[in-house]
Image: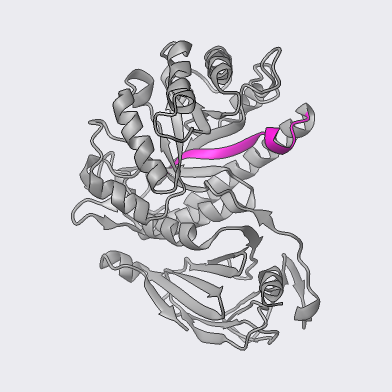
Amino acid sequence: MKKLNLLIGLMTLLLCISCSDDKVVFIDGEAVENPDDGNMDPGPGTAISPLLVGNNAWSYTRNITDQVWDLTADAGMQSIRIGGNGYNDDMPSNAILTDWVKRIQAMGAEPIMQVSQKDPASEAAALVKLFNVDLITGKPITYWNIGNEPWLEFNSTPTAVAGLVEPYFKERAAAMKEIDPGIKIYGPDFAYYIEPAIDDLFGGKNNIAGKVPGKDYYYCDGISWHRYPQSDSANQNLAYEGLDGFEDSIIKCKEKVDAVNEALGRTGANALGWGIGEFNAKNGSYVHNWGNGQMFGGILNLCMKYEATYATTWSMFENGGNRAGTDYSFIDGANMTPRATYRHMQMIAENFNGTYYEGKSSKSDIIVFGTVDNDKTSVMIMNRASSATAFNLTLNYSNSNTSGGVALNVNAGSPLSHSGDIEGLATHVYVFENGHVTRTSYTNSNFLNEEAPTVTAL
């Protein structure tokens, strides 16, 4: 009964956000008055990919220190992509790749291996043989990419690049799947969601989503692309405008995936998926930024909602973490301190698994979502507003209705409750598990002072 109540709990999520005494309660997006908590059933929710929260292993010198690997493992990363433009021209040696894959698998994450779009197809096939037939690390690699940002590599146009991608992608995909038909290949990892090219490559005139001739498997198993907010303006708030740009691309990608699956009859394990191979603020000077951290939280929320397979940020550590140029690290270089991006990824990786449920808010400054994973219910609340005035928050785990302030009701059949405030520029995570409630609080002040989030038992 306890487990049943907990599962009912997040499915009956009530959200009310207001600065006044007026109350607007949303249940799966529908405004209602005086809801009867015990009779609500918002549906089965959305399954979350176990690979969702990820990063990129990248180093010009091929030297990623033990400290960086350890901090990455501590962040709870679920996938690590070994990719980037540099690997099109200069793939790391097999010895380095083997070391990296072993480290990734040892932390419980899944490697995503990129092969070069320029090297012969036989070399891509040889890598599949090394890892999946010879089993040099003891465990095969399921997820692979072919090439990286071909639009930039070819210096082409959005309308012409698909014709350049199709030949090299099909040649390498066929050679790789001849070695192991069970692998999943995602691509082409465009620098952004280039809609005309993706339309041509997935179901269009340069289709790479169909079956390899004479085989029961497909050339490509997922659409992958990158995005860095397209503005150099210091006035851009990444948590708002940056996130908006991602949402538009994510919705278009999910619509394309659904349309291709229907048109080509791809279902079940053969269904086309999607993932983000790289994302971050556009320039290194904006990466070390509180808003970037909340943008990451918002991106992962959207990726859960629209069923992404993975979202791997760029990157673990580069350019010494010096806050300039090509520093896209999620670790700050001065004291090797986790940044706001790291902390938001860590909070989601550690607490948000199982089944996703969308939250609704009447205040656009606040993003809310939740998950249920067996006996664990998690809710994240991100207040993006910079106002010094805190919003009052009340969290109940029973059928009690609460008016005013920021009200959240999780019907977990427990008398436990908590009332407090959520500050401006703050992220809170509430976890209900085994009859206990904990709150993780992380604020802009924590970030600026290089402090870890605060965990409190309520």
Write down the quadrant of residue 135 in the picture: top left
- The span picked out in magenta is 265-279
Counting from the top left corner in percent of width and height, residue 362 is at: 64, 70
Q: Image point 47% across, 31% down: which residue?
A: 191
Between 414 and 263, which is closer to the camera in this rendering?
Answer: 414
Q: Which colour scheme is used?
A: one colour
| Residue 43 shows up from this direction | yes
Q: Image point 23% across, 43% down: which residue?
A: 65
Counting from the top left corner in percent of width and height, residue 102 is at: 36, 38
Q: Is residue 180 above or below residue 383?
A: above
Q: Is residue 42 above or below residue 457?
A: above
Q: Judge from the rendering whether residue 344 lies leftward or rightward of residue 369; answer left or right.
A: left
Counting from the top left corner in percent of width and height, residue 241 is at: 49, 52
Q: Image point 52% across, 69% down: which residue?
A: 381
Q: Is residue 316 above or below residue 71?
A: above
| Residue 117 shows up from this direction | no
Q: Does the magenta stretch include residue 270?
A: yes
Q: Is residue 47 above or below residue 426?
A: above
Q: Judge from the rendering whether residue 212 lies leftward or rightward of residue 65; answer left or right.
A: right
Between 76 and 207, which is closer to the camera in this rendering?
Answer: 76
Write down the quadrant of residue 57 in the picture: top left
Q: Does the magenta stretch include residue 152?
A: no
Which image quarter is the N terminus in?
bottom right
Q: Judge from the rendering whether residue 155 lies leftward or rightward of residue 368; answer left or right.
A: left
